[in-house]
Amino acid sequence: MKKRKRRRRNRRKRRRKRKRKKRRKKKRKRRKKRKEEEEEEGRRRRKRKKEEEEEEEREEEGGGRRKEEEEGGRRTKKEEEERRSRKKKKKKEEEGRRRKEEEGGRRMRRKEEEEEEEKARKEGRGRKKKKKEEEGRKEGRKKKKKKRGGRRRKKKMKRKRKKRRKRRKKRRKRRRKKRKKRKKRKKRKKEKEKEKEKEKEKEKKKKERKMNEEEEEERKTKEEEKKEKKNEKDKEKEKEKEKEEEDEEEEEEEEEEEEKNKKKKKKKK
């Protein structure tokens, strides 16, 4: 029973869909046709307007020349301005008249199309139902009023509420999922940023350590150089001392020898 009902409902739905599609197609066609007609009319109007303007210019030029010839000279500045203003006024009046005519035609066309659409919609509505209504009227029966708060309607509303509830539930679920994903993404982003900062700090420390080591090595080398220099100086000083001592010893020996020689000389005498 349920299956049968479902199938019937689906058939109805499909039928309605097809009808809707056809109506839309017809509407599109009508709209397209109307647009093309308006464009064609616009082209014709522009062409007509151009031709009229050219004719007017030709006439005015001919009239101006004639007037000049009759007067025996050229027009003054004031006369030229008056002529231009008259021309503009005439042009404006013609444009207004033409626009009114076009708007009236458009309005009429739109009205006719709307009436056609209404007629088509009415004709498309259930023919069987219409026939039954006509038969009933013939027999003298009154047309039944449509009940608003029936069992079917209540069931329908119940189904609608159920569907709405389901949709809401799904929507909430989707939103929850999206929220969770966003949170995860944010968390991951924060963790990545933290890791980057840690790596930066590590590199900084490494660089500082390297700098400190280099400074320490430089200091050590400087100290060693200082020590070496000091040692060299000490050695030189020792050498000088030894030299001085040797010189003193040599001097003493020389003095002793001199004294010995002196004594020997004295003895001989």
Image (cartoon, grey):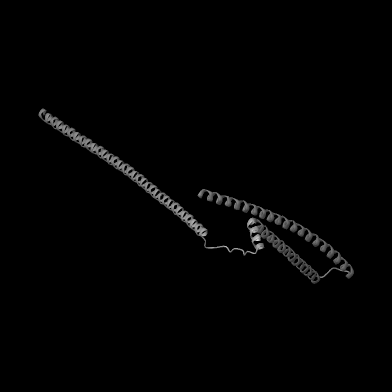
Residue 251 or 245: which is nearer the viewer?
245
Quick one: which residue is furthest to the front in this view?
139
The C terminus is located in which quarter? Answer: top left
Residue at image coords 53%, 49%: 4
Q: How many marks?
A: 0
Residue 138 or 168: which is nearer the viewer?
138
Quick one: which residue is furthest to the top in this view?
268
Look at the picture and state if 259 lies above or below 100.
above
Residue 144: give x, y in percent of width and height: 59, 63
Residue 185: give x, y in percent of width and height: 42, 49
Q: Is residue 144 left or right of residue 166?
A: right
Look at the picture and state if 133 lies above or below 203.
below
Residue 133 or 216: which is nearer the viewer?
133
Residue 70 or 142: which is nearer the viewer?
142
Q: Quadrant of residue 115?
A: bottom right
Residue 189: give x, y in percent of width and height: 41, 49
Q: Quadrant of residue 234?
A: top left
Residue at image coords 67%, 62%: 138
Q: Quadrant of residue 87?
A: bottom right
Residue 241: give x, y in percent of width and height: 20, 37
